[in-house]
Amino acid sequence: MFTIPHLDIPSLESVEGVVQLPGSKSISNRVLLLCALSPGLTVVHDLLDSDDTQVMLEALEMLGCSTKRSGQRLEITGLDLARLQNKTLSAPESLPLFLGNAGTAMRPLTAALAALGVNCTLSGIARMHERPIEDLVDALRQLGAHIEYLQNEGFPPLHILPSRMSVRSAVRVRGDVSSQFLTALLLALPLLSEQQDIEIEVVGELISKPYVLITLKLLAQFGVHIARDGWQRFTIAKGSEYRTPGEIYIEADASSASYFIAAAALSRGCLPLRIEGIGKNSIQGDIAFVQAARAMGATIEEGPNALVVTPSQHPLVGIDLDCNHIPDAAMTLAIMALFAKTPTRLRNIGSWRVKETDRIAAIAHECAQLGASVTAGDDWIEIEPIAPGQWQAAAIHTYDDHRMAMCFALASLNPQHCPVRILDPRCVGKTFPHFFETLFSLARTPVARIPVICIDGPTASGKGTLASLVAQRLGYGYLDSGALYRISAWHASEQGIPLALEHQGQIAQLVSELSLQFEGERIVVNGQEVSELIRSEAVGMAASQVSALPAVRQALFELQRNTRRLPGLVADGRDMGSVIFPDAELKIYLTADAATRAKRRHKQLISKGISAKLEDLLADLEARDARDTQRTVAPLKPAADAMLLDNAHLSIDETLELVLAQWQSKQPF
Ligand code: DC
């Protein structure tokens, strides 16, 4: 997951291949609660692992559920409800449950814990405390629930106090602010159905109906069948009891699929994208996004459990659509609208205003930053496409809203090749922690558009530390090219091959057959971990010898070039800027003098408990500098367009900030 302040996405050309998306958030959190309320063990497969499901799981564990996860499989044991009720009646203090910004945890847990009479407080992040819950609390109070607002009337945090709830007449709940209030009652009230049928009556027009259908379908899988009369009246039969299905599979998230459907439709390639784990048998309402995207011109084939999207060969067309049934995925339509020939109007989306952020305002503001003209009202938005030549590179605010980040990543497919900066990319953790990694694994773009920063310099100039820090701060990959020469020298020596010119062909052959794995700091060569081994002074010296052999340099050439991957690369070595990536946008050449470098290396070795003499180190350094600068192929020297940076008197942090500032000065944001 990218936990950096911003992520720059280079202009993308297409997405293609096959992708399996993470589980549905709506289904995952409902299933977790249903498992908790059903006696016995349930095995859940493909549960979404994200911020929203994490807070739900933690709350259920605090209440007494035991869970065991291994890979995509979670075992969860239902709550002992009688014990939980007895415990809270005797407990002097309320149980504090923190639910982040997960509406799918806050609303259903409020209802279920009120029905069980558990003494607890429910709180979340600041935005959660601005999201309404009054309609649900009012409905629960009709039944005798004792719920207090701890800050502002109508909003979390809440205090639920033990009370005995009873059902005498139909429970009335408003359905026009959030359908989660009705969902919460449908999930909780079977707990009170021992003595009588329970009727729930929806007041006002129910919004986001497909989400209520998900609730009803999942309830049925857990043994509770609810009768409904249109969307106005729901009846829970007397004696309804939860029964675990034993095992349950979670579908891939249909809202998450919308970003990939859109990306494939907006692609300028010709190869399809296959999205697995969701298809026409889906129980998620957002699958209806497929029809909306088709109406805009997308070509989508729907199988029972997969979607295949082929790039639209013609510009998309605008649509005028009531989006009440697909409130989340409709945000993706807003971004597709930027690419269309004609304007798009999305109507009946009032609920956007009370989601993770005011999404109508947020979409309007950020689309305008990209160059679009947008008008909006209380519950609608109209987007003019961006005219040719009018796209602007923009730094997109995401308002701690995962969907803002994921939607606006699609703007990187713009025909004008503008990059896009996503601020606070970590917010995707709410529902799709590896969204950007997934996007980059499917995305194609000409290699020249993938940014590279080269950091070259002599031995012990600090380039390795600097380069890996720059890479971390930008979320880019990191190439330590010196490690490749070290590995080559170490491996050739292991095989007993002298590191001499007459053996260069043999060494080059060996090098081209190496199996290499770089996993963060760990380096594995032909199955053996060599991370520490290759760092010795002796291997460094041998690397310097091997690196003077033209055939070895040639053998490593393509390997190094192939590390240029999305979203960008920071490469360190001797010839990154001069030979490997001559077209890099930024080339830094560190020039600290040999005496300073020898002192640094000395300090570093001593701190690792390795004894070393300063004079010897200096002599070694000078010998390596001499060999590296005098060799005939790719000698150590700054590229003509490199920025020389003498870091002898700078700390690593100061050098880092200088390089980042230099990089930023080249960005269009
Ligand atoms: O950066 P380092 O100390 O890990 O590099 C080990 C040797 O490899 C160094 O003496 C020179 C050589 N090298 C090179 O010739 N070209 C590179 N791009 C990187 C390293």
Image (cartoon, rainbow, N blue to C red):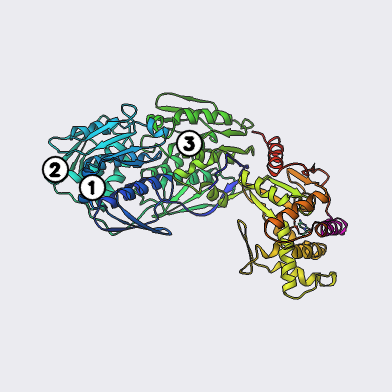
Q: Quadrant of residue 44?
A: bottom left
Q: Amino acid at mark 3?
A: Asp
Q: Measure the C-alpha gap from mark 1 to mark 2.
A: 28 Å
Q: Is residue 630 magenta?
A: yes
Q: Quadrant of residue 369?
A: top right
Is residue 476 left or right of 232 when viewed as pictured? right
Residue 26's place in the image compared with 249, above or below, is above
Residue 151: numbered disc: none
Q: Position of residue 52 (x, y in %)?
A: 40, 44
- In what element is the residue under mark 2? loop
For marks 2 and 3, the one nearer the N-term is 2
Most foreground residue, 379 or 24: 24
Most foreground residue, 83 or 569: 83
Is residue 267 left or right of 124 when viewed as pictured? right
Q: Measure the C-alpha gap from mark 1 to mark 3.
A: 37 Å
Q: Is label 3's Cβ within 8 Å of ligand 1?
A: no
Is residue 179 left or right of 519 when viewed as pictured? left
Residue 197: numbered disc: 2
**Residue 384 visible to an observer of this rendering:** no
The residue beneath circle 1 is 87
Of tags 2 and 3, the one toward the viewer is 3
Residue 400: numbered disc: 3
Q: Is label 1's Cβ within 8 Å of ligand 1?
A: no
Q: Position of residue 167 (x, y in %)?
A: 14, 38
Assess whether mark 3 and mark 1 are in contact (beta carbons under 8 angstroms).
no
Q: Is residue 485 magenta?
A: no
Magenta stretch, residue numbers: 618-635
Q: Is label 2's Cβ within 8 Å of ligand 1?
A: no
Who's the residue at 17% across and 38% down the image? 165
Q: Amino acid at mark 2?
A: Asp
For marks 1 and 3, the one nearer the N-term is 1
